[in-house]
Amino acid sequence: MPTRAECLALDQVDPLASRRNNFVLAPELIYLDGNSLGPLTRSTRERLVATVENEWATGLIRSWNSAGWMAAPTRIGDRLAPLIGAQPGEVVVADTLTVLLAKLILGALDLRRDRSVVLTDVANFHSDLYVVEAMARRAGRPITVRAIDRETLDDELGDDVALVMLTHVDFRTGEMLDLAGVTARVHDAGALMLWDFAHSTGAVPLDVTGADVDFAAGCSYKYLNGGPGAPGFLYVRSRWQGVIENPLPGWLGHARPFDFELDYEPAPGVQAFVTSSPSVIALAALDGALDAFEGVTMDELRAKSLALSDLFIELVEERLPGVFELVTPREHARRGSQVALRHDGAYGIIQALIARGVIGDFRAPDVCRFGFTPLYVRFVDVYDAVEHLVDVVQRAEHLDPAYATRLAVT
């Protein structure tokens, strides 16, 4: 079993170690929840001050031109595009993830009008399930949504399937799906593929171009550190641009928004999926956060992510044998950047750890979830987190009556 000294030695030779200085984190805090909300970056704080004090307070409405506010959704989309393996002009940042999924679901269904089935994962994030059901009811024709066990996907891919919508990394377990393999099988069946990258972007290498992905959407407040409620992003492969329609057209997706024409004509390219005025301050926060990824490859991040999660799994199983059930796949090819442990007392365990300054989170009904974000998590953080976990369990701190009532956000 690795010692604390050995973990400190790993941090000394870690090529990403200095990246932690980009984040506003207390030295003693062990933050293992970047898979839910990333921390503030120093560049985001600076960017927000400049946006508020210079662009808004001083530039006022002139800043739509002088500060480039109007072009921000596509400009920042181009900054984000390399993180998912997209090409320039294929990503736009706007709205929330759920709204973007709604746009893509309806748009995709209109491209397969001879088909009437949407497949999704019964274990998908609940917001995804809600929105796909709602969009199916609004498709203008009978659409059946089948929430399936993803392991049975091949058996479900009949010639009636119009669209498959899956999340690349499972939000509870951290299981990662085969992006290229699944997409190819969906295409072989004549259906379109829509991916949710909420738990992938900024955490694992993605190649939407190589995988021939049709559409994708994701959020920016997790591994991208864009801030609470930060805008989502939408990906439309170039060949579908000008073909798929935005079902929620708005003036900023118009070809000539300031001509104020009564009839809608979509803007060229992915700009057509912008509906209304973007949140400039939220976009500025994300723009600053993306600075943290400059000069780092996703392969470098992935290597450290796997090393951190391997270390965590090893230490937990050595120090607490049989106490937790590991629900995250051990195989690297099937693991995202988090580790999920099952325990009947999971909620209390997470709350007891938070009280000790180790931040993870709980997912019902019984999962302790820990995210390993390579830009700021250290190897010694992993060692110390497990030591705290051992203390919590052995001292039964999770049984404290204070943890009997769940907080609104878990």
Image (spheres, helix red, strand yellow):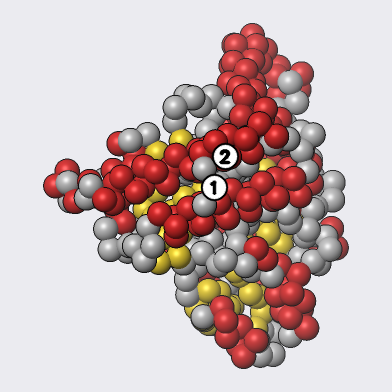
Instruction: Please give the residue where the numbered disc 1 appears in the rendered image.
Output: 2
From the viewer's side, name the closer residue of 195 and 130. Answer: 195
Instruction: Give SS at disc 1.
Output: loop
Q: Is residue 161 above or below residue 182?
A: below
Q: Is residue 292 above or below residue 151?
A: above
Does residue 187 appear anywhere in the picture?
A: yes
Q: Indicate the amino acid at tag 1.
A: Pro
From the viewer's side, name the closer residue of 24 and 263. Answer: 24
Q: Which residue is depicted at the point 64% across and 38% down? A: 10
Q: Position of residue 215 (x, y in %)?
A: 71, 62
Q: Which mark is residue 354?
A: none
Q: Which mark is residue 7?
A: 2
Q: Which residue is depicted at the point 69% across and 70% down? A: 178
Q: Which residue is depicted at the point 26% across and 58% down? A: 345
Is disc 2 surrounded by few (<14), some (14 to 19) or many (20+) residues within 10 Å?
Answer: some
Instruction: Give SS at disc 2.
Output: helix
The image shows a total of numbered marks equal to: 2
Q: Which residue is depicted at the point 34% across and 62% down? A: 323
Q: Position of residue 91 (x, y in %)?
A: 75, 48
| Contact check, label 1 and label 2, Cβ < 8 Å | yes
The answer to which image quadrant residue 335 occupies is bottom right
